[in-house]
Image: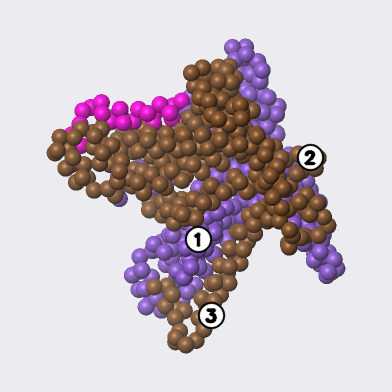
């Protein structure tokens, strides 16, 4: 092991380790401080934020959150964000798992081309899509609503989900599918084929095998893919900014509206920022290890 | 698997449909649109055919090439800093320590936060009047007047032409260095221990071991991390949009932001599609290179 060089007689203080912890703590502080300042600022009054002194000790106030949460727009946008992110996640998982299953377990003409073309376009950013999509978006009137795709939600007077939400769900799913297929493909390769073969011997067809045998044992793969898809869909700004209307804005779009040249309302802005980062950070607490696994899978497993 | 010939395609169909509608058709449209002049509010059918005019315009457009150069400058600094810091830290902290789960959780956080929020956070930290950074610079400068000569005074981080690039680089380094750090750490901890032990027995010291044994074995991982970061540099948009919106005087207008502004501020969609095409071509080439190093859909190796 690499640490042999540092192991010394037991009673001495392991200075090398102490040094490592010091570096780690400094890094953790640098990483956390900006986030903590955001959260702290969201509990400050505008007077305190604008005052000449940096009040590290202050009387926390709920007033920013009161204003945010009492604004009916926030609830509308939050539900819009949730509807879009959760739908995109579910759609990505189901369609991605089916595609990964076909690619990993079946041989058929065109398999290679299909696999590679998805990989080649997987880095296309949302902004590129936004530029070209807006044209037919407006021409087709998708920004308003597709008749028949209206579901009433008990939030404000918004009608969910209309064309712009359906559109965003499809784009977020498309943007996430290549990565999800690849991730689930990797998971499937670790699932022994014996289970499926047994199912087939029992007379199950491909669909029964997939939904009754493969689907249930893929849960850990699904968890990782779901986190990544949710993260993209929940955080995405550019497409949502261009395509959503006043009822279907997502929270990142709402947050961006706090930026203005004359007098930024810092407290509320930081409050909205804090509310946006809560769901992804909760996921981080539960699954940091799996998230790193997913992020590094491309590089490390090879 | 013994199965009907159509079955694989049925499994692929839903994903394929969504990818075609959500990715291929928009990309195809950007190719088409780049031959036309079309602006917001105009009926789609009224678009005017220009042939290769947009392409010629791109070729001669100083503003667009400037945005490409700015992307390179931005990319050079963020990738250099993130790779150096990330690699250095990974080598330093390679040894598994008690509590590493806790630290790992912290380091993942910046990667999970919405880019728009990263922008808002740094916009506040770097704000000229109310920002935390200026507050401490000024206070330290007042306490030790000598330091004022070294820059411990208030700065207009986001609107000073000399500092705006520095500011967006810093925010990117804050967000993405942990990514490099964790990729390389995972690679280091996955190195076969027998090789490391053998070189240790051969009397190699830490420096020799790192330079001659570990780094050479890590080449492909480092290259992949590098490529992933370069790709992300071309995709970066939201944080810069919030921090400087390309300013001052276009000093931080990277290619993706230039494309975005051409479309949604100048409302010149034909030319924006041309820029989108340029960006897509760059990203597709980079993705193909990345795929040569590591093809995730390859059969199990």
Label 3 neighbour load within 10 Å: few <14, some 14-19, many 20+: few
Q: Which residue: 46% across, 54% down?
A: A286
Q: Are marks 1 and 2 in contact (CB under 8 Å)?
A: no
Q: Which residue is mark 3?
A: A15
Disc 2 is placed on an element classified as loop
Where is residue B124 drawn, in percent x and y? Answer: 72, 50
From where the camera sits, is residue B74 visible? no
Name which of mark 2 and mark 3 comes first in the sequence: 3
Q: Chain of mark 2?
A: A
Mark nearer the viewer, 2 or 3: 2
Magenta stretch: dominant SS? helix
Horizontal and vertical percent position of residue A111: 31, 33
> Height in image: B114 above or below B278?
below
Would you identify the image quadrant in which residue B174 lies? Answer: bottom right
Residue that label 2 marks: A261
In reply to whether residue A132 is colored magenta, the answer given is no
In this rendering, the answer to whether A301 lies above or below B262 is below
Q: Residue at x 29, y 46 (%)?
A: A217
Residue bounds of the magenta highlight: B1-21
Question: B9 or A148: nearer the eye?
Answer: A148
User: Mark 1 falls on what kind of element?
Assistant: helix
Q: Position of residue A220 (x, y in %)?
A: 36, 49
Q: Which chain is purple?
A: B
Residue that mark 1 sits on: B104
């Amino acid at each position: 092991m690499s640490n042999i060089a540092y192991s010394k007689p037991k009673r001495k203080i392991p200075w090398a380790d102490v040094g490592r912890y010091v570096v780690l703590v400094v890094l953790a502080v640098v990483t956390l401080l900006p986030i903590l300042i955001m959260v702290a600022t969201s509990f400050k009054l505008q007077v305190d934020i604008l005052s000449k002194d940096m009040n590290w000790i202050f009387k926390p106030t709920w007033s920013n959150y009161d204003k945010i949460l009492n604004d009916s727009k926030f609830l509308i946008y939050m539900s819009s964000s949730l509807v879009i992110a959760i739908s995109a996640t579910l759609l990505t998982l189901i369609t991605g798992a089916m595609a990964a299953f076909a690619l990993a377990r079946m041989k058929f003409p065109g398999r290679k081309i299909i696999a590679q073309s998805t990989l080649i376009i997987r880095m296309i950013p949302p902004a590129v899509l936004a530029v070209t999509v807006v044209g037919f978006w407006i021409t087709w009137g998708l920004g308003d609503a597709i008749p028949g795709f209206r579901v009433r939600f008990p939030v404000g007077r918004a009608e969910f989900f209309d064309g712009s939400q359906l559109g965003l769900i499809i784009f977020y799913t498309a943007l996430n599918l290549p990565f999800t297929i690849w991730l689930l493909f990797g998971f499937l390769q670790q699932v022994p084929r014996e289970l499926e073969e047994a199912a087939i011997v029992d007379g199950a067809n491909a669909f029964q095998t997939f939904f009754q045998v493969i689907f249930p044992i893929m849960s850990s793969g699904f968890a990782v893919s779901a986190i990544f898809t949710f993260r993209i869909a929940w955080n995405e700004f550019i497409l949502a900014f261009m395509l959503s209307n006043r009822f279907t804005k997502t929270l990142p779009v709402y947050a961006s509206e706090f930026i203005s040249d004359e007098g930024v309302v810092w407290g509320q802005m930081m409050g909205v920022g804090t509310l946006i980062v809560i769901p992804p950070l909760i996921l981080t607490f539960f699954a940091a290890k799996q998230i790193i696994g997913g992020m590094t899978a491309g590089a490390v497993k090879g | 698997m013994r199965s009907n010939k159509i079955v694989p395609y049925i499994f692929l169909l839903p994903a394929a449909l969504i990818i075609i509608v959500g990715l291929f058709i928009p990309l195809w449209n950007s190719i088409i649109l780049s031959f036309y002049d079309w602006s917001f509010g105009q009926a789609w059918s009224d678009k005017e055919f220009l042939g290769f005019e947009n392409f010629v315009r791109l070729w001669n457009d100083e503003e667009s090439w400037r945005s490409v150069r700015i992307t390179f400058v931005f990319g050079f600094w963020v990738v250099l800093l993130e790779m150096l810091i990330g690699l250095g830290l990974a080598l330093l902290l390679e040894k598994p320590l008690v509590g590493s789960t806790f630290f790992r959780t912290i380091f993942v956080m910046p990667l999970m936060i919405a880019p728009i929020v990263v922008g808002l956070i740094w916009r506040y930290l770097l704000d000229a009047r109310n920002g935390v950074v200026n507050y401490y610079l000024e206070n330290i400068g007042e306490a030790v007047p000598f330091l004022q000569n070294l820059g411990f005074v208030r700065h207009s981080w986001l609107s000073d032409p000399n500092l705006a690039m520095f500011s967006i680089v810093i925010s990117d380094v804050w967000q993405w260095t942990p990514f490099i750090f964790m990729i390389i750490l995972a690679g280091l901890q996955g190195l076969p221990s027998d090789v490391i032990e053998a070189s240790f027995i051969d009397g190699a010291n830490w420096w020799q071991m790192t330079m001659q044994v570990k780094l050479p074995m890590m080449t492909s991982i480092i290259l992949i991390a590098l490529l992933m970061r370069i790709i992300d540099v071309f995709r970066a948009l939201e944080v810069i949009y919030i921090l400087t919106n390309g300013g001052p005087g276009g000093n931080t207008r990277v290619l993706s932001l230039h494309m975005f502004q051409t479309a949604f501020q100048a409302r010149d969609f034909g030319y924006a599609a041309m820029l989108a095409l340029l960006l897509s071509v760059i990203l597709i080439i980079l993705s193909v290179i990345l795929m040569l190093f590591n093809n995730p859909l390859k059969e199990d190796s």
